[in-house]
Amino acid sequence: MSGDALLLGLDVGTASSKGVLTTLTGEVVRTHVVPHGVSNPHPGQYEQDADTVWWADVVTLCRELLQGAAERVAGVAVSAIGPCLLPLDADGRPLRPGILYGLDTRATRQITALEREIPPEDLLAFSGMTLSSQAVGPKIRWLREQEPDVWARTRTLTTASSYLVYRLTGQHVMNRHEASHYMPLYDPATGDWDARYEAHVGPVRLLPRTAWSDERAGHVTPEAAALTGLKPGTPVGAGAVDALSEAVSVNVARPGDLMIMYGSTTFFILVQDAPTPARTLWTVGGAFAGQVNLAGGMSTTGSLTQWFRDTLTDGQTYDTLFTQARDVPPGARGLLMLPYLSGERTPIYDPQARGVIAGLTLSHTRPDLFRAALEGVGFGVRHVLDTFAQLGADVRRVVAVGGGAQSDTWLQIVTDISGVPQQVPATTIGASYGNAFLAGRVAGLLTPADLQDWVKSGRTVTPDAQHRPLYDELYRDYLQLYTATRDTVHRLAARQH
């Protein structure tokens, strides 16, 4: 079969799902996209339905992509937003909508309680990082405390990609990258669950077995085959978080490679061969055996531009907004914005942070405001990159991917602010493409070295040195603006619930 074999990669993102069918050499045969929404039932809470969104999208993607090709598919790999929390009953059925990743800040009180009960230095020594809205342990505790009826019926706790793997194979498996975020229930030293803190969170017996993302979780069941059109017995990978698959998709796979994924949020993955414990970033498992990642995430980036377009314009397109912002001089005519409209994850770990616009006058225009929003994200990216540097993490190459990387205007702004060149691959299909490669690994038809031939070089965006003095000054103001407004903003955030 290997001569004409095809590989299927599927990814469920925050705002849409995408699938790709490729050859063994990475040639794209078909792609398909399915848009979907996010539920925001209360301030700080973000959810999606596991069956009507996650699984329904996978079924739709398979049906669209497989037409006449199911017999040739040698392997399937999936990724999804994460780390999420989804409780299942004894029959594997979801008991409530899935609770999303660090964008969801509902467990702030549980984080505070855990930090009182477990010394933060002990958590850092054990998990390699500290608690934040990205951590799933506090959300498990939130579920136990706030929804006791659901908790009483829970027999499995899983994440989005793991649920999709379960629907395809009947096996409960979680990739080690997302398992790392189920702190403090995961031990990075062993790559498996650890019960030492389960009394504070929940029992580890409810969690799936752990695996690397290029390992086989199982095979497509007859039930899944009937729904998706896949051939029964097709090998299925252990799953991944979308950002990790996106990193694989652009050959961010060697120590020193850093991916910046500009999506609804911005995610950072630095590949390492040894961990860097950090209070301000996340130390997590990598895609391949033995790898670790130093990761970070901003909460509001692409979602900020979408909010701006939907709320503050009369139907303008993104192309128009970016073109107008390009004509606004650096510094946005004296405007400075904190882009914390959904709180912030790394490096400030502040779920109560909120957006701030400073310097606003009657003479400012909508393009000025949009430029300030783009620059605010740029300052946030620089803050994360500076944190990598302060930790002594070795960043040798930066690769930019995601929807935001397709905007020359935005990418140039971020590059000018950070002073760091960013490579943009010739083709950036996204996480689904990385999953197609992982599907080849699962099928036993590809090796990690084959990734070099999959990804073609593109352009490099370099900093414009003439803007550096201004952006250095504004970056200092950006950091000070957060500190100066934090207490006021926290009081305002408390009134929003």
Image: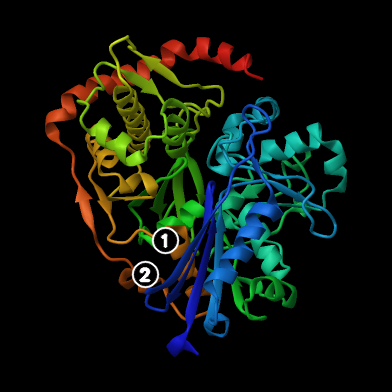
Would residue 187 be seen by someone viewing this image from the given angle?
yes
Q: State which quadrant residue 363 falls in.
A: top left
Relative to 142, is 31 above or below? below
Q: State which quadrant residue 173 falls in.
A: bottom right
Residue 420 point in image, percent of width and height: 24, 41
Describe the element under mark 1 as helix, strand or loop.
Answer: helix
Q: Which residue is drawn at 61% across and 57% down?
A: 161
Q: Residue 423 carries which label?
A: none
Describe the element under mark 2 as helix, strand or loop.
Answer: helix
What residue type is disc 1 on?
Val
Q: Residue 451 carries which label?
A: 2
Residue closest to the far left: 466
In this view of the protein, which residue sits in the foreground, 46 or 159? 46
Residue 278 point in image, percent of width and height: 47, 37
Q: Is disc 2 in contact with disc 1, using a CB cutoff of under 8 Å? A: yes
In this view of the protein, which residue sits in the foreground, 484 or 404? 404
Residue 133 point in image, percent of width and height: 59, 34
Q: Which residue is drawn at 33% across and 29% down?
A: 379
Tell me the quarter of the image containing the C terminus: top right
Q: Which residue is drawn at 59% across and 47% down?
A: 83
Would residue 275 be seen by someone viewing this image from the given angle?
no
Asked if residue 373 lies left or right of residue 15, the reply is left
Residue 242 point in image, percent of width and height: 51, 54
Asked if residue 203 lies left or right of residue 287, the reply is right
In primary-sequence order, the first of circles 2 and 1 is 1
CA distance for labels 2 and 1: 8 Å
Residue closest to the far front: 314
What residue type is disc 2 on?
Leu
Q: Residues within 10 Å of mark 1 (few under 14, many from 20)?
A: many
Q: How crowded is mark 2: few (under 14 residues within 10 Å), some or many (20 or more)?
A: many
Residue matched to label 1 = 248
Relative to 163, is 370 above or below? above
